[in-house]
Image (spheres, coloured by chain):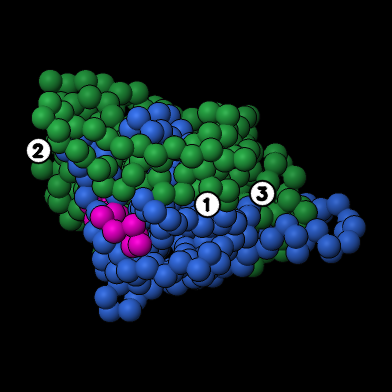
Amino acid sequence: MQTSVQLRLHRPGEGPGTLAKAARAGAVTVLTAGTVGLGAAPGSAAPSQGYVRLAHLSPDTPAVDVYLYSGKGALDRRHQRLVLRHVAYGALSPYQRLNGGTYTVAMRPANAAASSKPVLSAEVRVRDGAAYTVAGMGPYKGIKLQVVDDSVDLPAGCAAVRVIAASLKVPSVDVSLGGTRLASDLRFASVAPYEIVPARTAQVRVRGESGQRAGTRVAFGAGSVHTVVVLDGKPGLKLLSLVDVAQGSQTPTGGVNAGLGGMAGRAGTSGTGGAGETGDGGRTAWTLAGLTVVAAGAGAVVLVRSRRRA
Amino acid sequence: MLRAGAVPDVLRAGAVRTLSLCLVLAASAAGCGGGGPERPASGPTPGWSAVPGQAARESARPRYAGIGDPVELRVPSIGVRTSLERLRMGPDGELRSPVDPARAGWFAGGVRPGRPGPAVVVGHVDSTTGPAVFAGLGGLRRGATAQLSDARGRRAVFRVEEVRSYAKAGFPTREVYGPTPDPQLRLITCGGGFDHATGHYKTNVVIYAVLDH
């Protein structure tokens, strides 16, 4: 059975002249039956943070310095948050953790002054708990900064993968995973939507329009989300396999019972929640260790000792 | 604003051959005085022209090697040093807590420390008679460090970002266990009021930490 989840695609700050079209939105085909469970929209270090990574995926564009500024369009030192120097074709930064809000990414020729006019800039609005890839894409003559949303809702136990076409030598590719088509006739400088795939290790195969081939073996862990970037290699194609987000192979549900009550009600001993223990008017009680059970003919008696605190 | 928390990620990227990185924090820039308005360059940009036939260089992905199964946890600021049990999930999908209140436990069905995703360590706040290994967890402060070691002595050090408290009834499963792009750590214990009917605390205290190094 096939169900469908909508890829949550966000087009932050898309404005005239500043942004290329964000990745094509589309429904994610669920290849494995199942209910939509814990998603792969990334959790975060602090629940109010998001992630951005920066990439150079324009094959005939020279190396650039990539700047990240807070806010919209204020490209000065005061707003500068980060510089990645001499970023060459095929390079992706690790994800940067950022507070939610609007940022501006700007690219300048490598070693150009920080005060010089950027050759490209784009705004990215970072939502809490979301992740984005901001990539210079397309040919040198038409390079644009694309802001791609890296969030996808996953059925429990599944993984997801998508393909970014960034080869100028092979401007259209078909990509498959086993018998599953991940992308057909994916054109240069475009991003295929995430496809939900079973959690297992499998070979991603890329085939160009003139028969060029490339492959990479990817371990799709449950709950993990992957991106495969098709690049110009030397010779042929080069595939870059990225893990966008990951989690454990098993995911517990709900809270954890990690206290036995021996300190219940004692001041300053039960963590940050200690202040909440006045619900019963300051009267606390605790269950005796081992729950002394007296089997007396008809049943059991649990001894509970209570004490009153000032 | 990019917190100092982004530094390790950026430094990590320094290992990437094609990137040479320089982090400029707001704090350092803010003190640099007035400075004039930026002067946009005019005319063609020197050194900026097409380079046909470039090939992508060696993979630029960040590599998080992680450590093996952790056997010890240290949280110096609250005096915690404990060997670790291996924790599993119970039949209802709940995360089981350690058998011994004096030791914490690592969720072995989850993430290895230092690999992308949230590694999870649970410890009791108290035993039936007194404080247990994570009695002081709620007193952790942002910036404190937690260090996990494997049997070969390899270490992964995490830095505390947030201390949160949740009613178990509204436990945010995704936030705590859900996927993350970077290596993280969750330390979990109990807090809040004790429910005598169930014999359990009503609240979980969750420490959110990110890889430091």
Residue bounds of the magenta highlight:
B98-112
Residue placed farthest to the front in the image? A296
Q: Which residue shows up at 53% across the image and 38% down it? A: A308
Image check: A110 left or right of A95?
A: right
Label 1, label 3: how many angstroms apart (C-alpha)?
A: 35 Å
Name the residue beneath numbered marker 3. B1
The mark closer to the camera, 3 or 2, is 3
Q: Nearer the viewer, residue A248 or A193?
A: A248
Say which amino acid is labelled 3.
Met
Q: Residues within 10 Å of mark 3 (few under 14, many from 20)?
A: some
Say which amino acid is labelled 2.
Gly
The mark closer to the camera, 1 or 3, is 1
Q: Residues within 10 Å of mark 1 (few under 14, many from 20)?
A: many
Image check: A12 left or right of A150?
A: right
Percent position (x, y) of residue A72? 70, 39
Label whose residue precedes the other's in the sequence (2 or 1):
2
Q: Which residue shows up at 77% across the image and 54% down it? A: A78
| Residue A231 appears anywhere in the view | no
Chain letter behind tag 1 = A
Colour seen for chain A: green
Label 3, label 2: how many angstroms apart (C-alpha)?
A: 45 Å
Badges 1 and 3: C-beta atoms under 8 Å apart? no
